[in-house]
Image: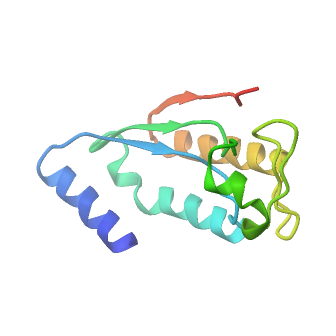
Amino acid sequence: SSDLIDFSIEMANKYNVNLVLLLIVGYVNETESDFHESLDWLDKHKQYAGKPIINLSVGGTLTVTDLTDLYQNAQDFDITLGDKIYLWQNKTIGLDYETRERRKEQFIQRAQQLGYPIVFDEKPVT
């Protein structure tokens, strides 16, 4: 829950435990509203940028590979698979590769503006 995440970050800060947050932008059901909640989270926690959050590792957007539940049950997740593992889309909520890439860049830009250190920005696996 958000409360447990907040508590964990507060305790890491109190006890000088460094955190590296591993993030993937664009889960299969992430709406525009959900994405804006992620941006709001960055704003709300900016006092922890640099300590205890020493790095945000923002990988590529979500990929769907053949051995995953997402791939094997794509219709249950309302996604259409593409010819590459990163080209899936959820047409119901308008979530496609271009949208996920735009959101990832926007997330990285916001995080950097707020002082979060970014580890790397991975390009999609082809």
Apparent side of residue 94 relative to residue 106 in the rendered image (left or right) = right
What residue is rendered at 71% in x and 52% in y? Answer: 71
Viewer-nearest residue: 4 or 69: 69
What residue is rendered at 75% in x and 49% in y? Answer: 100
Give the answer, above or below, for where 122 lies relative to 60.
Answer: above
Apparent side of residue 50 relative to residue 113 in the rendered image (left or right) = left
Q: How did the renderer colour the structure?
A: rainbow
Apparent side of residue 58 relative to residue 20 in the rendered image (left or right) = right
What residue is rendered at 64% in x and 37% in y? Answer: 60
Give the answer, above or below, for where 93 lies relative to 117.
Answer: below
**At which x and y percent is residue 28?**
70, 60
What residue is rendered at 20% in x and 51% in y? Answer: 12
**At which x and y percent is residue 1?**
38, 72
Apparent side of residue 92 relative to residue 8 in the rendered image (left or right) = right
- Residue 124 placement: quadrant: top right
Locate the C terminus and report the quarter of the image it occupies: top right
